[in-house]
């Protein structure tokens, strides 16, 4: 059973440019390091979440692998340095896990 993990971060809209500039640095870090999970970033245009929300999403083989990715982020010095710079802009953050249903006809 594969799992999709979403990290949903709502940020202060007054600091949107600074928040997204730092997010670009996270993306560059992911691209440069083969040990990083390769996620997809999304920003709502319309829906239930406000537009000052960033969603990072990645698929993992199972729930254990998704949890290991969270631990990896917390233990990585480069990630933590960027996170500390981005943290003042946060209004809220949460992590969600989804079971990927794969039905084949």
Image: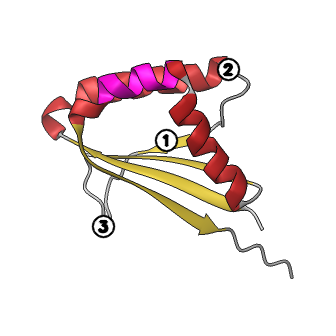
User: Badge 3 is on which residue?
Assistant: 48
Q: Position of residue 37 (x, y in %)?
A: 66, 37
Left or right: where 98 falls relative to 49: right
Q: Are marks 1 and 3 in contact (CB under 8 Å)?
A: no
Image: 66 above or below 36:
below
- Say whether disc 1 or disc 3 marks the residue closer to the N-terminus: 1
At mark 1, the secondary structure is strand
Q: Position of residue 44 (x, y in %)?
A: 35, 52
Q: Answer above or below: position of 9 versus 35.
A: below
* Span colored in magenta: 78-86
Q: Which numbered marker is on residue 79?
A: none
Residue that mark 1 sits on: 41
The verdict on residue 82 being magenta is: yes
Between the residue at mark 1 and the residue at mark 3, the CA separation in whole angstroms equals 17 Å
In this view, the residue in front, 20 or 105, is 20
For disc 2, the neighbor class at 10 Å (few under 14, some 14 to 19, many from 20) is few
Mark 2 near mark 1, Cβ–Cβ under 8 Å? no
Q: Is residue 38 magenta?
A: no
- Looking at the rendered image, the quarter that the C terminus falls into is bottom right
Disc 2 from disc 1: Cα separation: 17 Å
Residue 5's image quarter? bottom right
Q: Earlier in the sequence, mark 3 or mark 2?
A: 2
> If you read the primary sequence from the N terminus, does the residue marked by circle 2 or circle 1 appear first?
2
Residue at 63% over, 23% down: 31
Residue at 77 percent across and 73 percent down: it is 102
Task: Name the residue: 60% across, 26% down.
Answer: 30
Front disc: 3 or 2: 2
Quarter-of-image position of residue 88:
top left
Element type where label 2 sits in the image = loop
Q: Which residue is mark 2?
A: 33
Residue at 58% x, 41% y: name it. 71
- Calculate the distance from the C-alpha at mark 3 to the C-alpha at mark 2: 33 Å
């Amino acid at each position: 059973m594969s799992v999709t993990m979403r990290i949903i971060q709502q940020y202060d809209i007054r600091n949107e440019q600074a928040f997204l500039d730092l997010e670009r640095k996270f993306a560059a870090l992911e691209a440069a390091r083969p040990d990083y999970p390769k996620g997809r970033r999304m920003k709502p245009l319309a829906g239930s979440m406000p537009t000052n929300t960033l969603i990072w999403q990645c698929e993992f083989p199972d729930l254990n692998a998704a949890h290991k990715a969270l631990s990896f982020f917390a233990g990585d010095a480069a990630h933590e340095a960027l996170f500390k710079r981005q943290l003042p802009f946060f209004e809220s953050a949460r992590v969600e896990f989804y079971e990927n249903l794969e039905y084949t006809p």
